[in-house]
Amino acid sequence: MKKFELLQNQKNKYLEDLFDFLRIPSITRDAEEVKKAAKWLEKRLTQTANYVEIVETKGNPVVIAEWEPQINSDSEQKKPILLYYGHYDVQPPEPLDEWVSPPFEPEIREGRIYARGVGDNKGQLFANLCGIEWLHKNKQLGSKVKFIFDGEEELGSPYLEDALKAKIEFFENVDLVIVSDGPADPTWKPVLEFGARGIQTVQIHLKSAKGDVHSGNFGGIQPNPVWDVIRLLRTMRDENGKCLIEGFYDDVFIPTEAAIKAAEELNRDPEIYKEQLGITYFGGEQDLPLTHRLMFRPTFNIRGFKSGEVQENAKTMIPKEAIVEIDVRLVPNQTPEKMTKLIQAHFEKLRHKSERFAAIIDRCTLKFGSSFYPMFTSLELPWTQILEKAIEEGFEEKPIKIPLAGGSLPLYSLYKVTGKPLYVIPYAQPDEDNHAPNENMMVDWFLKGINTSIAILENLGKK
Ligand SMILES: [Zn+2]
């Protein structure tokens, strides 16, 4: 393919520019450096874009840019408008002594670029930007493109929604949104993702007595909070992995045929999971296939339990309290607000079950913590085929389609404000070590990212 050969010729220039960007230590909590990175982007963008603005927020700025099409202007049919999202803030690099080369002095070793933020997310957003620039330079940009550069993703993008709302007219006519972030699939195949599960965390704190007491002197009188919390937990989930909270599954979406087919095509081998996780049996809803449990179903997970002392600190005592931390993974149509209400209602109902339950619940506090909404783009939309084809061109390999990623993304505001289908196409290889020392991105994957971006824009321009 001729254009990709041309791209190879420019490879060194692209890498040099990326290195400049990586040298700015835009650690998310370092407002000054993040601002420098925003300025760097602004300078770069004004060379090609028709519109660039640094949007100030209560936190780090958001940079937006827009490119007008250079061809198709006389075409009667309106070409689709693509919005790219990326974030230019990075995680702190510590522990520094574990880095082979300094985190903000990018270096290539064995085909990989090592630098903090290269995979997460500067290298990935830069690949998309290079794609736009390449087409622009060759006067081949066939449809309008917009880009949004978030400066606070690593803090959960607390002001992104404000910034989006302040610039609502900028996002109004967008047709689809693409995010290149996160590592690709562990199989090393390129990926097209259609969404992610959401989350709601909850803490149950039962403080049943004033203090820890001697289990001989007061055994039989002071209630044991561990037994009581277990009683509570047993009302919330059965042995087959079903959550017993009334209404828990009411809003769970029914995956479409295309979503189920894509999940089946992933062809995940249960034995590989067993080996990878060092397990001999599976948790979760026993009556459902593994892929469904991994992406289409909510989970009610105990992520921590603390009471008393264990091992060398074990004592003959009755602990005064027990704390349980729970995370509920949400799937499309479920919301954190509704989940919070269902859990509260469950506790209220228990109060009426027996005097004993009422007494336990009186001493319990429920605390609801962080949450994200689930996101899901239908696989049946026409963009699926266009993107699949573009990734295949860019990576020279067919991508796998992941209907719902297991983890959660702070992209809900992007999804909510634009109201448009959102896709995740990661360009970092699976072992990018994001958030860890020696974060890296393979040069080859970076170039494939540029190729993919070019192919996406070309295919959208043809539509
Ligand atoms: Zn990150």
Image: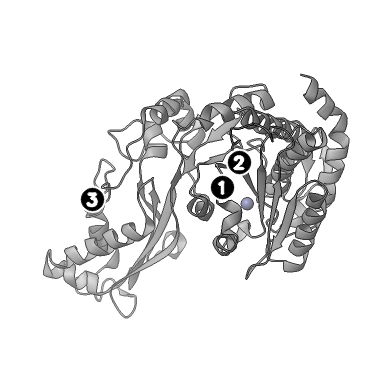
Using the image, tell me which numbered label, if any, was put on residue 173: 1
Mark 3 is surrounded, within 10 Å at the Cα level, by few (under 14), some (14 to 19) or many (20 or more) other residues, namely some
Give the quarter of the image for residue 359.
bottom left
Q: Of the residues tagged 2 and 3, which is closer to the observer?
A: 2
Which residue corresponds to the image point at 35% horizontal and 60% vertical from the top-left? 337
Residue 82 picture location, percent across and down: 61, 41
Instruction: Compare residues 337 and 167 and report the one nearer the observer.
Output: 167
Which residue corresponds to the image point at 85% horizontal and 45% vertical from the top-left? 17
Cβ–Cβ under 8 Å for marks 1 and 2: yes
Q: Secondary structure at mark 2?
A: loop
Which residue corresponds to the image point at 63% horizontal and 22% vertical from the top-left? 397
Q: Which residue is mark 2?
A: 81
Mark 2 is surrounded, within 10 Å at the Cα level, by few (under 14), some (14 to 19) or many (20 or more) other residues, namely many
Calculate the distance from the C-alpha at mark 3 to the C-alpha at mark 1.
43 Å
Lower position in the chain sequence, tag 1 or tag 2: 2
Would residue 191 be found to the left or right of residue 452 on screen?
left
